[in-house]
Amino acid sequence: MANIDIDLGKYSLGWSDPEKNAFKPEKGLNEDIIRKMSEIKEEPQWMLDYRLDAYKKFLKKPMPEWVAKEKLAALDFDDIYYYVKPAEEQTDSWDMVPDDIKETYEKLGIPQAERSYLAGVTAQYDSEVVYHKNREDLEKLGVLFCDMDTAVREYPELVQEYFGTVIPSGDNKFAALNSAVWSGGSFIYVPKGVHVEDPLQAYFRINAENMGQFERTLILVDEGASVHYIEGCSAPVYTTDALHSAVVEIVVKASGTCRYTTIQNWSNDVYNLVTKRAQAYGNATMEWIDANLGSCLTVKYPSVHLMEPGAHGEVLSVAFANSGQHQDTGAKMIHLAPDTTSLITSKSISKGGGRGAYRGLVRVEEGAETAKSFVRCDALILDDNSRSDTYPYMEIEESTAEIGHEATVSKVGEDQLFYLMSRGLSEEEATSMIVAGFVEEFTKTLPMEYAMEFNKLIEINMIEAGAVG
Amino acid sequence: MNKNIIDKKVRAKENKDFVDLTTKNEDWKYVPLQPDINNLELGENTNLETTDGFHVNTNGNTFNINQEVDGVVLTDLNDIATPVIDESIKRPVDKFLFQQITRATGGFRVDVNDNVVDYFKINFESEKNTIPYIGINVNKNKSAKFFMNFSDLVKSNIYPLIELYLDVNSNLELIIQATSSHEINLINSLYAKLEKDSGLSIHTVSTGGAFSRSRMDIDLIGNGSNFNIDGVYFGENKQVHDNRVFVNHLGQNTTSNMQTKGVLGDESTSIFTGTIHIAEGATKTESHQENRNILLSEKSSAQSVPNMEILCDDVICGHGSSVGPIDENLYHYVMSRGINKEKAEKLLIKGFFNEVINKDSWDIINSEVAAQLIKKYDNVFERSNNG
């Protein structure tokens, strides 16, 4: 059997292509950069005003003090490029995508063949979408799926009506920053009663050293419609810190369904500070499925505002904190109407000195009668250097609401290890298998090729930092 | 308190060095600041030289501090030479605690030199706003039982500062009962430091006062030490019951158990924040935490925040909490046996509390507490029927 020489010391999906950028402003942020950016994008005046207003809010807002204070203090806003425009113009044919970018996706495991399987590929490379194609039948159904910049130009009324309504620009410091300098991201509109059968998909990468990426996504699911959107991230390894600060807004109208799946695997020098929020109206269902494997610091609490009776929110979150990583993830469920229900399931794994945290909020407002919510947090700690935190806030103002919370923290059971090892597996393989089982609830929600990729990522994570102690 | 002790505790800081506490401060997040906690108004002549406005009785008789009882030595606050505890390991001094330390209006230190079999009862009495200090030091291999009672005799705002030190293999059982029917604010800070193989059990009853807040910081330093707390609370009118327990597992083989249950009626609110912190190297820790709330009335509310911070892999740790009305299935079960809804509710609430107060360690106060809780329930029930 031939020996396959794999260098596991390197980040498996971490490579970087030579940069080819037509426009590259200086590091740091000021009003001029925002004006210039808006001009290049040929944006309407309202968007420029929105950006400038958000920039003022960003300057005013203090840094959050309650999470990862030291890591956040190391973040230098002046050492980041806020807008980088790729040399290649947007294209609607795969053949026109430049070779080096294609290679990037080859390594990421999005071969051309997948195009026919997936409903549409929007691959974000640097700050703008470089490849974008909708399957024709989606267009026939009236589904709009394009990058956000295009949407601002082509569907101004729809965008202006909803943009910034779920997450106002002054929501928090990073949402304000994104509102000021956003670039790229996806826009989806699913018309009334339309069911999009296959998942829509977009891959994001950061590909310029010290380049922040501030994509902005807006998903509108009209009455009785349904959609599943998958967002996967993978970034090249760089030595200095990069900032990824996205804003994702979703509106699910009555009886609509939306599932938003994220697999976040930024390289371990990226700050991932993301604001994600959805509004679910009468009998609508909103599901956030969120896996965080990469980044040095992730701060992300996908939330659902349950606006009208019968709305249902769900968050299934998996976090893997390896050496040097702090995954501060969780969920927020705000019950604003009667008979709303929510479910939060959080699974976290800490290893090699990593820190995994669940931080969540369930809030039931007065009048949200018979609202029900259940929160379950399970954590695995794989060695003595690692840390696992649970901060579940529950604020209940309604007496007929039923709220429950359960959490456990444990290590991999010795009896489980013994069982598997007695069948010939090494300790590493056995531990990997147990961890994969621990997160199975998540993997089984994924399309098959994603599930396989995810399990592979878990395996790489388990082996990369050496033996499990 | 002796100036040297104060300096050590507040680390040479002055009042102006502390920022004002607001609801933005995580520790005081749910406190509506009814009392102006940033500038406590105390009774006249309240300084370290006097115990005016604060009386301590034991077993119903006015107790003469410095008097010796079997196995117990009491020292007046002003004569304490060494502190019971220098400082808590995790909790920083904030503006409120600073005031408690520097402005304590009276109190004493208790040294337990021999086993105290019967409960040593401390009835607090106050006419003017006061900060009593109670330090309990349980010596090696000794055990003691204390009962701190904040009954109707407490007629003013009271901000007790309680410190507990448990030496190797010692044991302390402590009941803290707050039932004062006066519209007062009761805010206490409690610290405990547990050495090897020592055990601390705290039982709390909180039904009184307008605003009642208890913060406990427990440092399990010694290997094999263990901490238990169980408690009940019942809110009516606009009462606020704010319970905070921070358990800091530092030694190995330590255990902790928290179980608090409460019912909220009228427009009352409860807050529970429990944090289990397991330090690096604190292997074989076992810790459980449970907080259950029943909301009886439309305008009642509950905030429950059971936190965990785990820095060690070889642990068993879990928590659970819930907020909601009484389970419909339970009603169905009871009512299908011919009991009407009102009686069923009362019965189920009794049962809800019995899980805590029927334990052996509650024997001494069980019937009194049960009656208290039912009385509270009747008050709420009556109001909801009349209103």
Image (cartoon, coloured by chain):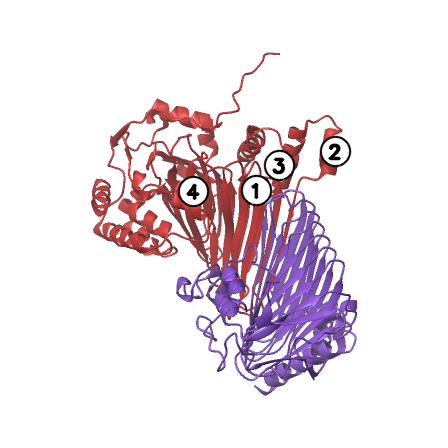
Chain colours: A red, B purple
Q: Does residue B329 appear left or right of residue A226 in this picture?
A: right
- Mark 4 or mark 1: name the one nearer the start of the chain: 4
SS under mark 3 = helix
Other residues around mark 3 within 10 Å, as few (<14) / some (14–19) / many (≥20) = some
Image height check: is A415 above or below A395? above
Marks 4/2 same chain: yes
User: Which one is in front, B252 or A417?
Assistant: B252
| Mark in front: 3 vs 4 | 4
Q: Quadrant of residue A40?
A: top left
The chain letter for the residue carrying disc 4 is A
As helix, strand or loop, the secondary structure at mark 4 comes to strand
Mark 3 → mark 4, Cα distance in angstroms: 24 Å
For the residues labelled 1 and 3, the Cα–Cα distance comes to 14 Å
Q: Residue at x 48, y 25 (%)?
A: A10
Mark 1 and mark 3 lie on one chain; the one further toward the N terminus is 3
The numbered disc on residue A436 is: 3
**Is disc 3 in contact with disc 4, using a CB cutoff of under 8 Å?**
no
Which residue is denoted by mark 1 in the rendering? Answer: A445
Q: Earlier in the sequence, mark 2 or mark 1?
A: 2
Q: Which mark is residue A272?
A: 4
Residue under numbered circle 2 = A418
Amino acid under disc 3? Ala
Q: Is residue B277 visible?
A: yes
Q: How many marks?
A: 4
Q: B104 or A14: nearer the eye? A: B104
Establish if A80 lies above or below B234: above
**Element marked by disc 1:** loop
